[in-house]
Image: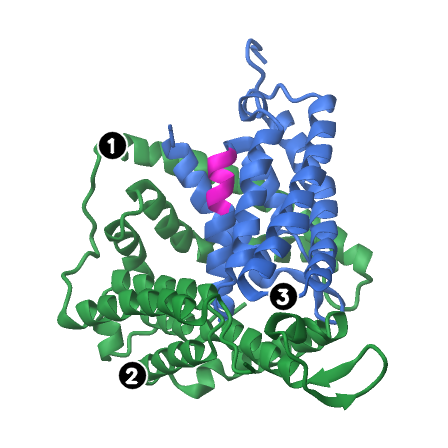
Amino acid sequence: MKYSIKQVVATAIGSAIFFVLARFVSIPIFANTYLTLQYAVLGFFAAVFGPFCGLLIGLIGHTLTDLAFGWGIWWSWVIASAVVGFLSGFVVKSKKAEEGALEKSDLVRFIFGSLLVHGISWGLVAPGLDIAIYAEPANKVFIQGLIAGAGNFVFTAVIGTALLAAYAKTRVKTGSLG
Amino acid sequence: MTSFGYIPRKTIVDEMSGASKIFLTLAMSISAMITFDTRFLLLVIAVSISLFIMAKISFKEIKAILVFIFVFLLINNIAIFLFAPEQGVLIYGTRNELLRISERYTITVQQLYYQMNVTLKYFSIVPIALVFFLTTDPAEFAWSLNTLGVSYKIAYAVSLALRYIPEVQRNYRDISQAQQARGVDISKKAPIKARLKGVLTILFPLVFSSLDRIEQISNAMEMRGFGREKKRTWYSGRSFISYDYIVAVIAILCIGLSVYTIVLNNGRFYNPFI
């Protein structure tokens, strides 16, 4: 498998942004519940740089965040983040994004794809692992996953899509001299 | 925007290589995930707390975190009880009632024991992760991961991420101040919707300037021939000392013991009720 230099650097910078957003930028909305933006950026980076890059950003970004918060490493949710990054990489063709050839239909695809991705990660992977590892009660972890997943999905759909649309505009289209 | 992190303390734990500390942290968290045996979880916590003491990390540094973890575990325990008051009975197969609150909510010995185990399991990874994080020089991360068999490109990505976290943070602050000078309010006084909009006016320039950055850095690396060879050397590599081997043995023992408890208990749970 090819893991280009650009993807190595994108993994690093993506993880750094994920970390800074998760660690320092949060808007409290309710007791113990914060709005965080890192999953929008994760979805965007995965779409642009591919699934393997997304997987690593989720893995590295989340692990470093957990370590810096000092509460240990919560592998079940770290793995769920990695799954988000990995699957998001398949939603739109990264080559298409790179060439500035993204159309409206691709953005719609990104939104529905993200719904599926976050549904799988926070609806199945995270609660599944919580049950497998910590023997947590099923109804509790599914509700937790649903709340987290809904928030992460909404942000990815709104902000991630906006990022992707803006990115497509910055790219020079193949075959264009402009 | 301050964060706590590595400070050289010149203790034995500092002297150990990052590779062996990563190995121990992984081994301990995996073994604590495998089993639910109370005795084993207590042993893991005891070992990691003694490393914590050896590392001479002051209590003041981590007081805020401990309070946070305590509150988190408390909320988690309350949530478990609210959602599944009979989970312990289900797992251990016996039922000794202590206190009947209502038709649905009864406090049983089994439930208390189960929730204590879940709490221990969550807590067991905390001290060792703190020791690892507070005593390992980030410059050594890449070498450590590579030594443990992670591909050097991925290891390099990790160390590059650590290198750029302060820069991204500074970038974020600069853009944020520029936007605030233009009248964007992201303080607690603004309503949530306005704050969210404000944060977005920071996020977009941050992401797009980072994309330019990726281009620059990867070009520079390419010109220096990164990724041409199958292997590479590191500036911050070091040789193992005897403590590294002791730590490695402890790590392997941990996993072995954890698997042994499953054989011993005929499953993941140690059941003192039968």
Tell me the shade of chain B: green
Name which quarter of the figure residue B100 lies in: bottom right
Distance of mark 3 from mark 2, alpha carbons? 33 Å
What is the x, y in percent for residue B118? 56, 73
Residue at label 3?
A136
Q: Please state the chain letter of the residue tagged with numbered disc 1 in the rendered image.
A: B
The disc, 1 or 2, on the residue closer to the chain's N-terminal end is 2
- Label 2 is placed on what type of residue? Met
The magenta stretch spans which residues?
Answer: A51-57
Left-right relation of B194 to B77: right
**Dot 1: within a 10 Å radius of its alpha carbon, few (fewer than 14), some, or many (20 or more) residues?**
few
Whether residue B202 appears in this view of the structure is: no
Query: Chain drawn blue, letter?
Result: A
Which image quarter: residue B186?
bottom right
Of discs 1 and 2, which sits in the foreground? Answer: 2
Subunit of mark 3? A
Residue at horizontal 37 percent and vertical 62 percent from the top: B26
